[in-house]
Amino acid sequence: MKKTIAFKMKLNPGMKEEYKRRHDAIWPELKQLLSDSGIREYHIFLDEETDTLFACQTVSGHKNSQELGNREIVQKWWDYMKDIMATNPDNSPVTMKLEEVFSLK
């Protein structure tokens, strides 16, 4: 089963370049976990006026990146990113699920 999910997150002001730098050097083991979990495409866009990150994933299977929080590498990534974005007490990014209202295929 293939599906597309989208959610938004909040970047701290002035952290665009650092966020991009960290993602340009994403850890190979994290990238592998995402792939092994069925995440086929993962795009993140930034609205610079609001520092809102918009994420979109194409997933085959039943899990998305936000459901991998029990994995040690994901927890380490969250800890690594917590200083540049809004996070929950467990360091996971604050995410707001977005509802698909239109799709052109």
Image (tube, grey):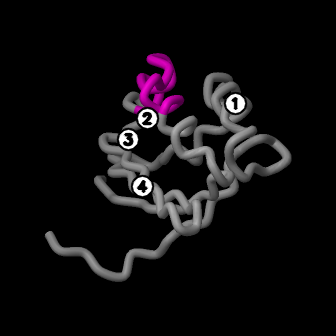
Is 56 in front, or is 69? 56
**Could you tell me how far apart the alpha carbons at marks 4 and 1 are, in whole angstroms?**
22 Å
Residue that protrudes farthest toward the bottom in the picture? 101
> Of the residues shown, which amino acid type is indicated by label 2?
Ser
Q: Which residue is mark 1?
A: 75
> Of the residues shown, which amino acid type is indicated by label 3?
Ile
* Helix, strand or loop for disc 2: loop
Neighbourhood count class around disc 4 (C-alpha, 10 Å): few under 14, some 14–19, many 20 upward: few
Mark 2 and 3 residues: CB-CB less than 8 Å, in contact? Answer: yes
Residue that protrudes farthest toward the front in the picture? 14
> Of the residues shown, which amino acid type is indicated by label 4?
Phe
Q: Earlier in the sequence, mark 3 or mark 1?
A: 3
Q: Which residue is mark 3?
A: 39
Q: Which residue is mark 4?
A: 45
Is 92 a magenta residue? no
**Could you tell me how far apart the alpha carbons at marks 2 and 1 are, in whole angstroms?**
16 Å
Q: What residue span does the magenta drawing correspond to?
A: 21-34
Q: Residue 40, percent across and down?
A: 31, 41
Q: Residue 11, percent across and down?
A: 63, 53
Is 50 in front, or is 10? 50
Q: Which residue is mark 2?
A: 37
* Helix, strand or loop for disc 1: helix
* Helix, strand or loop for disc 4: strand
